Amino acid sequence: MLKRIQETVNYIISQFDHKPTVGIILGTGLGGLVNEIEIKHIIPYESIPNFPVSTVVGHQGRLIFGILGGKNVVAMQGRFHYYEGYTMHEVTFPVRVLKSLGIDTLIVSNASGGVNPSFEVGDIMLITDHINLMPNPLIGKNFEELGPRFPDMSEVYDKNLIKEATKIARHHNIKYQKGIYAGVSGPTFETPAEYKYIHTLGADAVGMSTIPEVIVARHMNLTCLAISVISDLGIEGKIVEISHQEVIDAASIAEPKMTVIIKELLEAL
């Protein structure tokens, strides 16, 4: 793995020598944040050695370098999922690369289903903790150069970043929630019984991404913030048939609110 990471980093640097301090992963329907970035360089995933390729609608598959909120950033416009058939090591490989490119902070976004009865479609949820119901991406050989065999997960999501994001949301009268995110493999949307089970476990929202990336980020001691856009509801009496396109549409409507929070958060860092 170490050799593959270095090969990928060497290629990226050969294309554009820009040291980012913040990495951003954009989820389904949330790629509009890219419009706020002062773009310096774009690299399609398919041209990057060892990189997976996005296969899901709503994930363009580009690595974007530029400036946002006065900070050098690298944004993944599109991510990879376990349900696409990739291994967890492949899903999280780009996070390893972003760390090696120089980032110290990772901001992750996703579209998720709300299971908290007080949630509404379009809400922004700042993730305070998670419940991992997928295979752990750290299973297998550990490389001490990357992180410890048994990394601590007592504070995965940085409290100071959450506090600052909360302040920004309040300033702009953006409705926000705080909650626990459950990660499942997908690709099926949950049954009513599964929604109920997930809420009973203590989760407020459920999705098919984010947690593997954040686990790997914390393994490498990156500071993390994660934001969910509630794109549908898994609440008894409010569950309706949902399609992937509807998730994209709902996320796209809420995306400008998330963009304001992330942009001003970077300005405050």
Image (cartoon, rainbow, N blue to C red):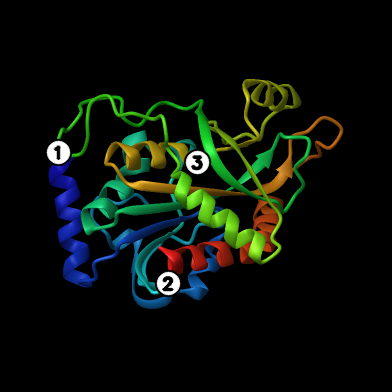
N-term-proximal mark, 1 vs 2: 2
Q: Which residue is mark 1?
A: 145
Q: Secondary structure at mark 1?
A: loop
N-term-proximal mark, 2 vs 3: 2
Q: Residue at 30% of width from left, 62% of height from top?
A: 21
Which quadrant holds the N terminus? top left
Q: How many marks?
A: 3
Going by the image, does 74 lie left or right of 236?
left
Going by the image, does 250 lie left or right of 209?
right
Where residue 8 appears, as percent x and y from the top left, is 20, 55
Mark 3–mark 1 distance (CA, rounded to whole Å): 25 Å
Disc 1 packing (10 Å; few <14; some 14–19; many ≥20): few
Where residue 237 appears, as percent x and y from the top left, is 87, 33
Seen from this angle, which residue lies furthest right?
237
Disc 2 packing (10 Å; few <14; some 14–19; many ≥20): many
N-term-proximal mark, 3 vs 1: 1
Q: Which residue is mark 3?
A: 209
Indicate the amino acid at tag 1: Glu
Q: Which residue is mark 2?
A: 68
Quarter-wise, where is residue 112 in the image? top right
Q: Residue at 27% of width from left, 59% of height from top?
A: 48
User: Which residue is nearer to you in this view: 55 or 58?
Assistant: 58
**255 above or below 118?**
below
Where residue 115 appears, as percent x and y from the top left, is 71, 34
User: Which residue is nearer to you in this view: 241 or 239?
Assistant: 239
Q: Secondary structure at mark 3?
A: loop
Which quadrant holds the C terminus? bottom left
Indicate the amino acid at tag 2: Leu
Going by the image, does 168 lie left or right of 95?
right
Marks 3 and 1: which is nearer the front? Answer: 1
